[in-house]
Image (cartoon, rainbow, N blue to C red):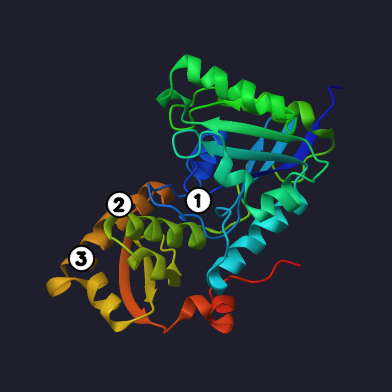
Amino acid sequence: MTEHKTGYVAILGLPNSGKSTLLNALLGQKLSITTSKPQTTRKRILGILSEESYQIIFLDTPGILSPAYLLQEKMMEDVKSSLDDADVIILIIDVKEDPQAETLFNQEFVKASVFKSKKPKMLVLNKVDLLTQERATELIKIFEAKKIFDEVIPISASLNFNIQRVREEIIRHLAEGPKLFPDDQVTDESERFFVSEIIREKILEIYRDEIPYSCEVLIVEFKERETSKHFISAEVVVERESQKAIIIGKVGSAIKKLGEVSRKSIEEFLQREVFLELRVKVRKKWRSDENLLKSFGYTKKE
């Protein structure tokens, strides 16, 4: 019998470096939400890739940052627990924003935890399609000379360039072991979770400035109906009344648009029609409230 390999792979990097886009490319389907705005991912998302000879459990993580409030502290706890759980570590950089990884490598968490880890480490240079061949080659040589990483791989996650090589290098570093999840399981999260993430993705796309970062989405009701549309009731939680007014918009125009684009994406995800109801609730300073964060699913990882 051919040996079977299994392991956990943590995808780590700065906000907006392409972690979720890389996860989706590696899985061959969209699981994590992606937007052009930083700090899109707030919670660790597990994605499972199962083939006959291997099973890779990817951990998509929030962006590495220095926390400014309690929510960001919780996000960094997810990053730390993912590093602890991982068998292989992927560090990803955006070569246009941080070409020599100076910002990433100077993060205290990276210096104190990632670099000191004895686990196999891969550096993935994302968006190399935006560089000349000469510049990409130069960067690869710079990082290889540091002798920190087992592999340095140039990719374009959005164009699916070199993704197969990333998979192959991951498999090479995995240990032999049995499958930990059924073949048909691609995540450990529920449909409710992904519906809330889809709505949050649309908030990030539609609204500007601080508004998206002050929002949380809760699924209050999720009724599966055989003979009619699924019924989904969601709350958009904000911190101030002024933010509530912006989410709703003039005569409800903004929330109507949010509902329309969210519903279409939810229907594509669930592969069936839904009736989506959106309400806006104010929870003052929820991003710094321990009890509210716990009720929203941001809990300290044991």
Q: Which one is in front, 164 or 81?
A: 81
For image coordinates 54% across by 70% down, the residue present is 71
Q: Is residue 183 visible?
A: no
Of all residues, the one furthest to the left in this rendering is: 251
**Residue under pointer 3:** 254
**Counting residues from the N terminus, which is met first, the one under dot 1 or under dot 2?**
1
Disc nearest the viewer among 1 and 2: 1
Q: Is residue 273 visible?
A: yes
Q: Which one is in front, 89 or 179?
A: 89
Whole-angstrom CA distance, mark 1 to mark 3, is 27 Å
For image coordinates 50% across by 55% down, the residue present is 41
Q: Quadrant of the C terminus?
A: bottom right
Q: In this rendering, would 36 be left or right of 74?
A: left
Locate residue 10: give its quadrant.
Answer: top right
At mark 3, the secondary structure is: helix
- Contact flag, marks 1 and 2 (Cβ < 8 Å): no
**Residue under pointer 2:** 264
For image coordinates 53% across by 26% down, the residue present is 155
Locate residue 144: give its quadrant.
Answer: top right
Q: Amino acid at mark 3?
A: Ala
